[in-house]
Amino acid sequence: MALLRNRALGRADLSRALGLSKTALGGLIADLGAEGLVVENSVAGNSGDKHLDPVLLSAPRGRRPALLRVNAQRAAVIGVELSATVFEYGVYDLTSTLLCVERLPSRRTEGEARVYSQLLGGIRIALERAGKLGYPVAAVGVAAPGPLDAQAGVVLMPPAFPELHHLRLRSRLEDDLGLPVRLEHNSTAAATAFLRQHDSENFVYLLLLEQGIGAGLVMERRVHRGAHGYAGEFGHVSLDVNGPPCPCGNRGCLERLADVDAICQAYAGRARADLTLAQIVGRAGQGEEVALEVLGQAGRSIGLAAVGVVNLLDPSMLVLGGPGARASPFLIPAIRRELRDRAYPYMGWGEHLEIRVCTLPNPVGRGAAECVLNALYRGDIALNQPRPAAGT
């Protein structure tokens, strides 16, 4: 299934890839076909015929080999992003295609009951929309700010969500929805989405949020969560022990100097004007000195924090994603200068490290969906929902 998720394959290619005999493969395909998980082109090689039939156990002699592929309509998953400003609910099919999405302003400051009610209500709306499209939902993935315990499904103490501290989110949602639920760190989810789209073996995904900065760590195409599942709290690297206090209890944390809110506050303090990041970036593009200085300082702070990551992990690439990445034309030069000057200078790591901007429109929500899709393909979540009725 994982092989067919990436591309359609003929039986001979699939047999070679899996090391199975023709008979064994035929039995496996028959089982998957009976479950509605795999479909096969009825006329392979005819680009004008895109109709897919249930798996055929044999094809007429002389017929060109058909291609097997995942039946994308067999089921869907819901990917949810919880952020300081917006809750996103996306419905994705088994090939990671986005079917529909809804974004609602976050009510995170209104107490645990209202926040959870909004989360549950949004998922139920997504379930209804999936049903109208003919897709039974197999599982739900939720990506939230850390720290959190992904394995236990518990939100720990994210500074941006004090109302959700110590909430056993996974078990509560599973009880209310009757579906498997997975909880994931937002930066890890974003890195998972990027990994699905690119061939990079080792990279660090820097998620620049309105409130917070996270890091998704990918090594040898595996997402690294740490011994306790808490890896990725890049925003709480302390750059100035005498700096501004952070809700985490430390001082001078990176996110207090370089997340979107910090950039906007720094600009307001200098220019006496409350502007959005997009407006500040626009002014920087026009050459305004204050905007250029504020964005440059944020880039320097990110670069300083990234030096330790680069020295420690030697990644091939840094990826900037999230709302703050819109400032990348002004952040990247400053980041690169710090890496060039400080990341083991005589090795030249900072000079040759690739820095890329993630172009996925919704990396965190998509990543939440990818995490549950990966669990489905591994068999960690059973795909036992009823098949959609024909013609729905």
Image (cartoon, grey):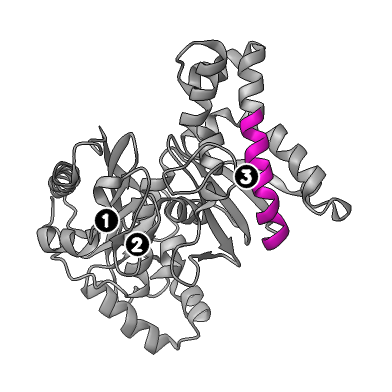
Residue at the outermost right position: 346
The residue singled out by tag 1 in the image is 77
Q: Is residue 312 magenta?
A: yes
Marks 3 and 1: which is nearer the front? 3
Please state which of residues 184 and 11 is positioned toward the viewer in this rendering: 184
> Which region of the structure is painted magenta?
297-313
Q: Please say whether residue 63 is visible from this viewpoint.
A: no
Q: CA distance from mark 1 to mark 2?
A: 7 Å
The number of callouts visible is 3
SS at circle 3 = loop
Q: Is residue 131 magenta?
A: no
Q: Which of marks 2 and 1 precedes in the sequence?
A: 1
Please provide percent x and percent y for residue 336.
73, 39
The residue singled out by tag 2 in the image is 373
Q: Which of marks 3 and 2 precedes in the sequence?
A: 3
88 vs 227: above or below:
above
| Residue 352 located left or right of residue 335 | right
Please provide percent x and percent y for residue 219.
60, 65
The amino acid pointed to by label 2 is Leu
Based on the displayed image, in which of its 4 quarters is residue 283 positioned?
top right
